[in-house]
Amino acid sequence: MTNLEDIATESKPLPELIFEEEFIVTNVLSQTNLIDDNIFSLEFDKSLQINKGYAPNLTLNVIPAVLASNKNIPIKELIFYGNSPVRKGDIIKAKVPRFKLENRESATISTYNRIAFYDRPYQTTERAIEISIVDGEKIVRIDRAIDYPKYQKNYY
C-alpha cells in the first residue's frame, strides 16, 4: 500500500487488533531468560523502559477449546512474557495481538502517524499478552505480559 488515503481507510487502531481466544493447555514450558533490549519492543515504540536482567517466559502448547468462537484457528503455541500458574489441562482465554505493521514514509506526517496496523491471519505460534485462567464459567486469575501496556496505546 502506498496511497495514504488507502492506508488511513484500511488500517486500524492497535487495540482493535487484539483478539481473545479460548484454549486448552496441553503443555507448559517455563523459562527464565536474559532480557534483551529488543525483546519487548514493538519496533516503533521504545517508550516502555525495562531494566536489563532476567524475565520469565512461558511457552504454552494449546488446542482451541470446544467453546472457542472459531475452532479452526491454527494456533498451536502461545508465547507469554510473564508469570502464570497455568498448568496442563487448564482452560484459558488468551489475548493475542494479530497485526501486521507498515511504516509509511513521509516528511509531512508525525512519527506515530507513519505507522499503520492491519489485520492478518493467525499463525501457528502467536504471542499472548494476557492469560485468563477459567474455572467453569468464571475467570479465576488474570496474568498480563510485561509489555501489555504497549498494546493498549492508540498510535494514531
Image (cartoon, rainbow, N blue to C red):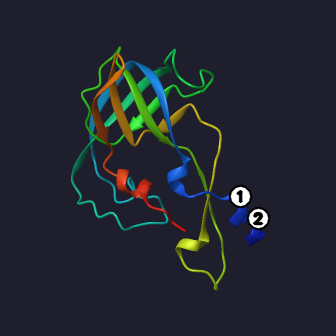
The Cα atoms of the two marked residues, 2 and 1, are separated by: 6 Å
Q: In the displayed structure, does residue 98 sit left or right of residue 86?
A: right
Question: What number of labels is visible?
Answer: 2
Q: Secondary structure under badge 1?
A: helix
Q: Position of residue 27 (x, y in %)?
A: 37, 19
Label 2 environment density (alpha carbons within 10 Å; few <14, some 14–19, many ≥20): few
Q: Which quarter of the figure has residue 58?
A: top left
Q: Secondary structure under badge 2?
A: helix
Q: Position of residue 124 (x, y in %)?
A: 56, 31
- What residue appears at the point 57 percent right and 25 percent down from the top-left corner? 69
Q: Are marks 2 and 1 in contact (CB under 8 Å)?
A: yes
Up/down of 151 relative to 156, above or below: above
- What residue appears at the point 73 percent right and 71 percent down from the top-left corner? 4
Per the image, the residue denoted by label 1 is 10
97, 27: nearer the viewer:
97
Q: In the displayed structure, does residue 26 sit left or right of residue 143?
A: right
The amino acid sitting under disc 2 is Asp
Up/down of 12 relative to 124, above or below: below
Q: Position of residue 95 (x, y in %)?
A: 44, 39
The amino acid sitting under disc 1 is Glu
Per the image, the residue denoted by label 2 is 6
Q: In the displayed structure, does residue 90 sit left or right of residue 109?
A: left
Q: Which quarter of the figure has residue 23?
A: top left
Label 1 environment density (alpha carbons within 10 Å; few <14, some 14–19, many ≥20): few
